[in-house]
Amino acid sequence: MPLLALGISHHTAPVEIRERVAMNPPDYAARIRQLLGIEGVEEAVILGTCNRTEIYCFASQPMEQELLNWLHQSHSITPGQLDPHFYHHTGEDAVRHLVRVAGGLDSLVLGEAQILGQIKEAWQISQAAGGAGRVLDRLFQHTFAAAKSIRHNSGIGTHPVSIAYTAVSLARQIFGDLSSQNVVLIGAGEMIRLCGIHLREQGIARIEIVNRSLPAAQELAAELGATASALESLSEVLPRADILISSTASPVAIIGLAAVKAALKKRRHRPMFMVDIAVPRDVDPAVQELDDVFLYTIDDLQHVVDENMQQRHIAAAAASADVELSVDAFMRWLHGIRASRALERIRSQSHTHEAALIEKAVKKLQAGQDPEQVLTQLASTLTNRILHEPTQRLRQAAEEQHYEILKAADWIFSSEKDREDG
């Protein structure tokens, strides 16, 4: 039974194409029920992020075209219009793809960790909607463990590759524990917001937002659990800054050399860590000459980001062995499931024949027929009935020259002695 992954991502389509088939978590359950209504689809999980839309399914037959048709129809798109942008993987290739996605090895930002949480949410919704059965449930739980192992063994997530996260990481390198530091964030845009989020994750208790627009500073401060000040009060705020990160749209520097010198004097020359992410720069470059100031610009951070991205590529290459081990382990389980189903059919058919023949044999014995003759006939008839269909199939395989089937049958039905003699 085919295991299939079908999707579209930043690798195969621009955002204007991806957004046409985008699916969000609130829509997953209804969409999964639609998928389960397609003949042949037994299990299904939908994954949607800003960079990808993917369907994972376990089916009784190949389903690529049916799923593509459904995607077009369910999004009111002309059939076949987006086919060239989609990729599909089957069997172990589908498993490999999911493991790589979960491990951050297929992400736009290599090694990012957010995708694993998104996959877990998709799996949980599918479970609740009846989409994740025995196979996909096992696949996704196996993938979560594999992704955790990949990230731990490769260290792919230990090298920050965003400007905001890199700024916070550098602060941690200088101060160690950040929880006791005072932080001043100048600006109220997305970069400052991300810095604030990362700082909160490091246990920072005191954050102050300074911005030209006080309402904007107050809005961001409410989100981060910080305090807010207007830019006019910067000279009062500056001495409190153990860590300062600035990202405004000012055309000129807003933090001059004299202001920093005055702040250091009030701080009794306790060190200040300053990150100027703005272009043009917010901090006078002369400030970097002061002994008690660690000043980094966006170019400094970009250099660190580039080095870290290179380290992530090295880690991703090292993770390939873990990916393959994970794929092999799951495929062994899946092949075992297929073998057990075949054995169940064989046993069921055999027991059906056995029950019918025993019933006839008992009646013959009760009628006084020779027990030896009855038992001999039972054994002979049972053997013939069990072997009837396999014999016909093997003859058909021979006539159609399916030599792999004949080779497999020879291996299955040969004894240990036969194999040793052969």
Image (spheres, rainbow, N blue to C red):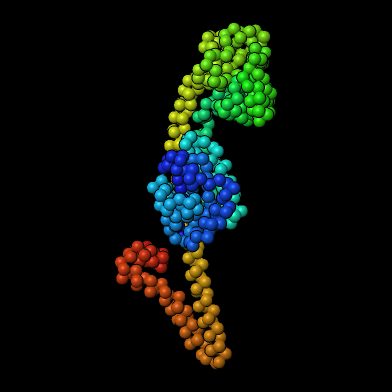
Counting every numbered tag in the picture gives: 0
Left or right position of 282 against 225: left
Can residue 330 be seen in the rendering of this structure?
no
Image spot of residue 401 (x, y percent): 30, 66
Q: Is residue 414 above or below residue 177?
A: below
- Residue extending farthest to the bottom is 368
Instruction: Name the one closer to the observer, 392 or 128.
Output: 128
Question: Residue shown at 52%/56% (left/top)?
Answer: 35
**Quadrant holding the C terminus:** bottom left
Name the residue: 61% across, 19% down.
212
Q: Residue at x 57, y 42 (%)?
A: 117
Query: From the viewer's perspective, is 99 left or right of 126?
Result: left
- Front in this rendered view, residue 56 or 271: 56
Looking at the image, which is closer to me, 230 or 270?
230
Residue at (60, 10) in percent of width and height: 260
249 in relation to 27, above or below: above
Residue 333 pos. (x, y %): 50, 55
Task: Using the rendered image of the protein, determine whether residue 261 is visible from the camera's viewpoint.
Answer: yes
Q: Quadrant of residue 410?
A: bottom left
What is the x, y in percent for residue 25? 58, 46
- x and y, in percent, of residue 125 in the image: 59, 50
